[in-house]
Amino acid sequence: MTTTPPPWPGDPLPERELELAAADRAVDALCRTRPEGGLLVYSGAAGIGKTSVLARVRARAAERCTVRTTRADPGTTAVPFHTARALFAPDLADTDGLAALLGPHRALAGPALGLTTPGDEPADPQGVQDALVALTARAARRHRARPLVLVLDDAHWADGESLGWLAALGPRLARLPLLLVVAHRPTEHAAEESRPHLDALGTAARLRVTLRALSPEAAAGLTRRALGTGADDALGRALWDATGGSPYELAELLARLREHPLDPGADQATAVRELAATVRGHRLADRLGGLGPDAARLAWAAAVFGAGIPLRLAASLAGLSPGRQATATGELRAARVLNPGDTVDFTHPLVAGAVYDAVPRSLRTTFHGRAAWLLTAEGHSPAAAARHLLEVHPDQDPALVEQLRRAAREHLAVGAPDAARRCLERALREPPEHHLRAHVHHELGCAALLTSPADTVRHLRTALELPGLDDTLRADATFRLAQALAHNQQMREASLSVAFAAATTEPGPERLRLQAAHFMYDAFRATEDDGPGRSRRLAQLADPLAGETNAERALLTLRAFDGMLRGENHTVVAEFCERALTDGHPAPGLGWTDTAWGFEYPCLAGITYAWIDELDRAEELFGEAVRAYEISGWSGGHLAFAHMLTGAVLRRRGRLAEAETRLRESLRLADRIGTGLPVHWDAVCLLVDTLLARGRTADAQRLAEARGFGPPYPDAMILPDAPSVHGRLLLALGRTDEAVAALEAASAVAERGRHNPVWAPWRRDLAGALATRDPERARALTRRLRVDAERFGTPTALGMALGCEAALAPAGAAPALHARAVAHLEESPARDELARARVALGLATGDRDQLHRGLLLARTCGADALAEQARSALA
């Protein structure tokens, strides 16, 4: 892309030596034997010289590096991934190396970069961003011989999707042979959605430089350089006073003075101030007035289209023939409005902005409408034309509404939900025909589902209040509304929304889908009004079902999950799981990436298996989830949840170090999409539980405090039982009174009919806390724990209950109970529980073999504190 050269092209930039030296050092680091990448950010007001600095950086880097550069433009701020496409244009044009560049992410990166046609389904925005980061890393490695330098000017005008990619890339640059150089105005000039990305780039930068105005001495030197040594310091000072040291305004004034020197007899200061007024603000566009109507219309059309559009299209928009276009183009270049070339390229963003502001408002709207039509006629997609449609005045135009809806679908398909939202919000202002308004609100709600649950709730509720949706769409809108409410920690509202819809829907598949969702969201509530009653109603509905349809399979999944929580016999629970699955896998339509029913049902099946000691089945299901999300590019909340579930299985197996790693990865992924989400609570709860099992109490405490883990808890149920885990943390910290109170509060799960002693092991911990202060209560707790464990019947539950009973039993009875606990836990997949039981048996009997075996198993599990206890006993 051409850029305006400074008025001193061959000379050093005045007072920019330190800024350029920083870039030289970054390029030196990039070109070492072991390349060190990085990020440089230059910021400053309009006209402060950012473009000139970047031009010099590019020129110096090009001697040793491969340089890719682009300049963002206000006209493309609303075009998703436009900046990414522009930066990689030369690499994307290399058809021989394109397949290797895209790698396994072609299905995600291809549509975003305009290489392949978008699919019919929305793409996961986080997945697309990750695909572009991976593509950038491959591009950097391809250019090792001449390391890659990416230069982005006017980043404050870049589209939000591209800025999100660069912000995600920033922290990785030190490990890549890649230098990113960015220049932007202060962030208040950027779109609101872009500001966090610019701030993130600044945080990740090796160096962040704010460019300052030139000094009076620099202005005097430039004046002599441009006008000759005869120019005195007084003129230089007058120029500095008039421009405030702005390099752009100073360069413009010097160019004017070279063409039209001041009258020797004139008052220099007054003349310079008057001349300076013509190069800033609205006066910048006044120079068009003397160029004739053709030049003005061509400039206006070019400003509406924005940079990079062929001048012939701008001329067509202005209504100029090829001959008149040539004349007008020459005049605009002579007046330093446009740079040479066949595409729209203003000499400076200030000029482009002033010209755009000068377009009469009514003509501007007309031009935007015609620009959209011209782009469509040229074969561009609805998404490319949409940015112009956003500027057209509402006029109840059904065709425009349909264009915007098509553009929104395309934006969603490339992973740009914010762009889709803008199109649909504009479509609502048109407005749509009465029978389509519910459809547009429904589409808006779906577009915002991943980025703004509150907007999703508002639009879907409106869609359901309006006429126009058939039963299928109405059920879909209700289902997605409930998802958004649950995502927003509003479980009661989610449950009520599907319950009401189910009651008003005719019998059939959609009603069953809604009924299943009602049971599910009620089960997810931590403070359910009538848990036992809901369980009875669910059992009456689901027990006779064979699992022949997805609605039946969904209900059977819920029945299995509810039975697991209630502590029903594990063999009965497993039989419900078998009926809910097809050959041990989710049925078509109920899979991990199927959106009609949601991922919750296979997730609940896997969780159920994990807590009835069927960990191989759970691991297989959750492994499928991770693979499905990675293949589909769902690297946001869904992948975070899949890693959390895999971590839960590892925790249940007693592979504590591996569980910790997987759970931390889940948190890292979840943090990218927000905070306080259900996956955060689950991952933190499991991680605190895992750290306690490892004996790392201080780490668990720091994590709990940093993440706000503790009461009050959200209305959504946390995996596993959060009050039980929090009570155990307090016990480990020695805060026994607080622990007893917390574990007493955890007993509320029993009041709701949930008696699974492994999911909510509060009785075991409370019995231990009360052993000395209230032994009778402690023994009562162990007796009930034993009853629950025998009813549930898993080896883990029986072994844990016997171990708890043994810890409180008289010395003579304890060894036999410890031995029985070991025998049960030898059949359990929970290796850390077996290690704990062996150490307890060894301590109770003095059996060094049991202590030694417990020590080895504890080390294998990563239960460090338990291993140290066994080692000390052996010593």
Image (cartoon, rainbow, N blue to C red):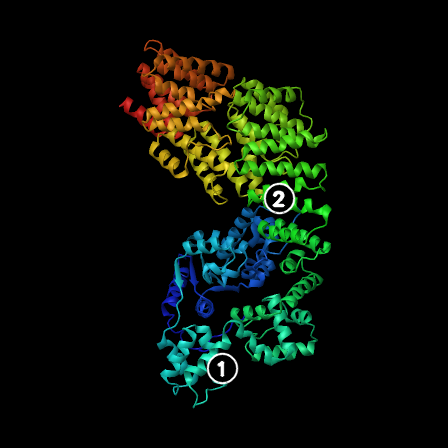
Image height of 347 relative to 868, above or below: below
Asked whether residue 279 is in view, the answer is yes
Number of marks drawn = 2
Residue at 37% across, 70% down: 17
Could you say where residue 709 lies in the image, as x and y percent from the top left? 42, 34
Place of residue 306 in the rendered image (x, y in percent of width and height, measured from the top left): 59, 66
Q: Nearer the viewer, mark 2 or mark 1?
A: 2
Judging depth in this view, the residue of 88 and 476 nearest the camera is 476
Q: Residue 477's spot in the image, x, y percent?
A: 65, 39
In terms of secondary structure, where does tag 1 sit?
helix
What is the secondary structure assignment of the residue under circle 2?
helix
The amino acid type of the residue labelled 2 equals His
| CB under 8 Å between discs 2 and 1 | no
On the rendered image, what quadrant is the N terminus found in?
Answer: bottom right
690 relative to 327, above or below: above
User: Residue drawn at (34%, 19%), measured in percent from left and top?
Assistant: 849
Mark 2, other Cα within 10 Å: few <14 / some 14–19 / many ≥20: many
Q: Which is more toward the observer, 725 or 658? A: 725
Which residue is more in the foreground, 779 or 574? 779
Q: Which residue is mark 2?
A: 459
Looking at the rendered structure, the kind of residue marked 1 is Arg
Q: Residue at x 26, y 23 (%)?
A: 875
Using the image, tell me which numbered label, if any, was put on residue 256.
1
Q: Where is 479 relative to 203, above or below? A: above
Q: Nearer the viewer, residue 518 or 671?
A: 518
Q: Earlier in the sequence, mark 2 or mark 1?
A: 1
Q: Position of residue 260 (x, y in %)?
A: 49, 86
Q: Residues within 10 Å of mark 1 (few under 14, many from 20)?
A: some
